[in-house]
Amino acid sequence: MRRHPLFWLPNALTLMRCVLGVVVAYIIFMVAGKEASLLEIVSSPRVDMETRLIHQEMISNFRTFWGHVAFVIFTLSAVTDFFDGFLARRWGVESKFGRLLDPIADKIFVGVPLLTLAWTSGWPWPIALPVLVIVGRDVLITVLRFIGLGADAMKVNFVAKMKTFIEMILIAVFLLLMALAETPDPFLSNYLSIWTVVLWATASLSAYTGVVYLAGIIFMRFRKPEAEDITPAPSADTTVQDTFNTDTN
């Protein structure tokens, strides 16, 4: 059977998702660094009010522009999470490499931006703790996949896929807030508080799926083999008797 001419595209989309996850993380880091440098001028008592307002507007414009860029990149990249698997199945080009790479790409695509967000925020515990739970769970599962431990028990299920989908939405919403919310907006802190609550809920779901994976591995590795039904071989006397009965009937 002739292989599809674009057989390489599904894996290319998966690899692209890894790279663009790092790009989004870099944009978050760049915006945070720019804001920190300009805020020194805005908050300085030696700077006149007009200069402060100019730099405040510079912060807003810079964050808005790169927030939109990061949101578009992240959203378009998230769509590839569906298309790489869909195209691989549609064209009959599924591979072991692709099945291994896809969940790793999801973890890089989600984990690197989340870690960058926690880092640029100064590691406040309401954000750092759930982020570390999400990333720690993903690193553990990835390591177990690499060493082949519990491979049969670690097939991606619906709950795990839903977890990844929610994590992607969570990051996309943050990027949208970065693009649209103005710094003086009195509701900005409310938006971020709601976002943090959803982050904790997502971390709880992530921890749950991790426990389910580990429980499946433990069950498969340590369960006792079922006793096989052993039918005793017929004795010579029984065989003779059965033959006699058959002959007489």
Image (cartoon, rainbow, N blue to C red):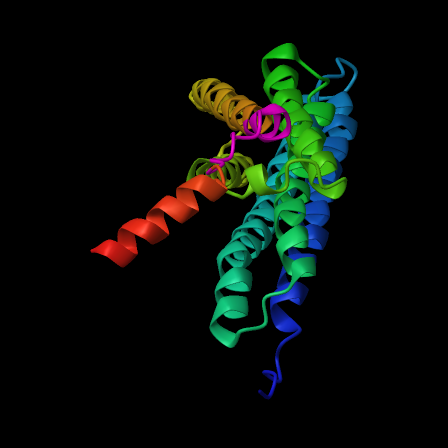
Q: Residue at x 63, y 63 (%)?
A: 13
Q: Quadrant of the C terminus?
A: bottom left
Viewer-closest of 84 and 22: 84
Relative to residue 46, is residue 248 depicted above or below?
A: below
Counting the numbered discs, the total is: 0
Viewer-closest of 189 and 184: 189
Q: Is residue 223 left or right of residue 25?
A: left
Q: Residue at x 71, y 32 (%)?
A: 139
Residue 219 shown in magenta = yes
Q: Is residue 174 left or right of residue 247?
A: right
Q: Residue furthest left?
A: 249
Does residue 50 show up? no
Instruction: Choose top left, top right, bottom left or bottom right for residue 117.
Output: top right
Q: Position of residue 137 (x, y in %)?
A: 64, 27
Q: Position of residue 109 (x, y in %)?
A: 64, 45
Q: Quadrant of the N terminus?
A: bottom right
Residue 225 shown in magenta = yes
Q: Position of residue 69 (x, y in %)?
A: 60, 51
Viewer-closest of 199 and 44: 199
Relative to residue 222, is residue 101 depicted above or below?
A: below
Instruction: Choose top left, top right, bottom left or bottom right for residue 186.
Output: top left
Segment colored magenta: 216-231
Q: Is residue 237 left or right of residue 221?
A: left
Q: Residue at x 59, y 66 (%)?
A: 94
Q: Position of residue 181 (x, y in %)?
A: 49, 33
Relative to residue 26, is residue 98 depicted above or below?
A: below
Q: Residue at x 41, y 48 (%)?
A: 240
Does residue 57 show up? yes
Relative to residue 147, is residue 201 depicted above or below?
A: above
Viewer-closest of 123 and 40: 123
